Image: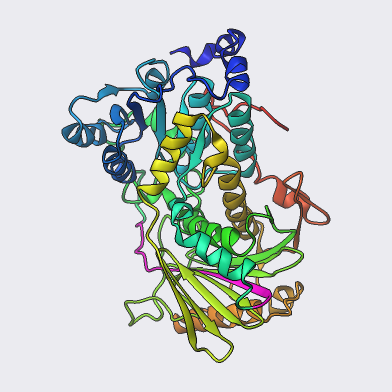
Amino acid sequence: MRHINRRDFVRTGLAASAALAWGAPLLGAAAPNEAIRLGFISCGGRARDLMGTFSKLPGVAIAGLSDPDQSQVGRARQAYPTAKTYADFRGMLDDPGIDAVVVATCNHWHCLAAIWAMEAGKDVYVEKPLSHSQWEGRQTVAAAKKYAKICQVGTQQRSDPMQAEIKRFLHEERALGKIVSGRVNRYGVRASIGKLAAPLSIPSEVDYNLWLGPAQDEPIYRNNLQYDWHWVWNTGSGEMGNWGVHVLDDLRNNVFQDKVTLPQRILGGGGRVVWDDAGETPNVHFVLFDTGEIPVVIGLSNITAAPDSKGSPKVPGPGSGYIAYCEGGRLEGQRGRAQAFDRDGKLIKEFKGNSGNGLHQQNFLDAVRRRDPSILKSDVKVGHDSTGWCNLANIAFRTGGAYSAAAAAQLQDASGQWQGLLAEMQQLLTAHGIPMNSSQIRLSPLLEIDVAAEKFVGENADAANRFLKREYREPFVVPELIA
């Protein structure tokens, strides 16, 4: 495995020549009229979805398959029998027969796999969230620049043509006037992940050392190894980093037009309630982002509206989407559609789109062929910034102490969205017999952010900054490319 000696790759001058010659095909890049040979790092459910999407596009070959779980590789191989398989994806990175890779692993592997791939001369399509911690996201942005690689993040709704129509409506036509506040929702019911009395037995077909990679070797007490890693901090980012990144990315795109990279201050809380399971991430989460201009709140819930209910609580706007509140009305957006209402609540315009699937992957391929990252709809920096809002929201939860109404009111929101969200959360928790000020609900201190440095500053900085970078397990260490 050559990744240990990848400094030799840089010394050959290949990376330097790549940075100077964007117009020419690079190491591992397909010539304009050749098929782009894709290797997949992970063969799980999302990876197989992406295989299906990419395989339908012209000029693409699914050429490589790798996953620590050999049962996953076997499923993918049935659909793509001519693809080469690799017991360890680092062998794929060393293979000149692979032009670009798709990273669809657990969250904790996204950045390191992407960085190693770009270091090896491959372009990268990496699933959201870009990072598991803010620091490693910065390193991935730096790697794309250093190695002059195409790196697209899988927030596919960015490629929906509807988004350009919405931005034109809101910002060029100013059809609803000035935007005064924003709200983001992700309400979707999930089930408990269980709690085992003894650690989970890892299936024999799984290379568990490789599956863990950068994560710590900790006992697992949930029922399932796969997918439910989302709800444990060692490997996942909770619902905030799962669906939250999609809906926050829509808001950043359409309300802020990416001009606000990170909020200036943040206040947030929540809890993991109702389920007595092995999960750690909150299943109710509420956050206020102070951007210095337009305040934004996000509410997330994975529990039902009440013990005798099967659905999510009713909230303003779409259950999975965002609202731009304006002086002249509001715009409610979600994946594939949006609606604009005047101040009296009358529907005045509808927008119809699609999920961006297919278009987003084609956008990546176009950038690879042209050697032009500027045409990417969700380049690594955009993906890093949107993921950053989620990382900060999770840090707010993790630094939290006891909830109190007085502490929740310390960051004022003239729009009233924060107060409204807190009232909704109180109603939801009360329906489940949980007081808002119970020990199960926490609230962060007010956290101030140095946006340029992507670090917390001020009175509560030390408690929060310790979550900006994880402890890596050797030899699976994200390299420091930028401080």
Picture coordinates of residue 204, whole percent (x, y): 25, 31
Note whether 171 is above or below 158 in the view shown.
below
- Is residue 226 within the magenta segment? no
Res 436 seen here = no
Q: Along the horizontal axis of the image, is 76 left or right of 377?
A: left
Residue at left offset 52%, top offset 84%: 427
Q: Quadrant of residue 249?
A: bottom right
Residue at left offset 77%, top offset 64%: 292
**On-image quarter of the N terminus:** top left
Picture coordinates of residue 337, whole percent (x, y): 41, 68
**On-image quarter of the C terminus:** top right
- Is residue 184 within the magenta segment? yes
**217 and 303: which is toward the camera:** 303
Picture coordinates of residue 187, whole percent (x, y): 44, 70
Q: Along the horizontal axis of the image, is 127 left or right of 179?
A: left
Residue at left offset 47%, top offset 65%: 283
**427 and 89: which is toward the camera:** 89
Res 116 seen here = yes
The furthest residue to the bottom: 344
Q: Quadrant of residue 85?
A: top left
Q: Along the horizontal axis of the image, is 62 left or right of 265?
A: left
Picture coordinates of residue 171, whole percent (x, y): 63, 67
What coloring was used for the rendering? rainbow
Residue at left offset 31%, top offset 51%: 223
Q: Which residues are magenta?
A: 177-194
Note whether 357 is above or below 419 in the view shown.
above
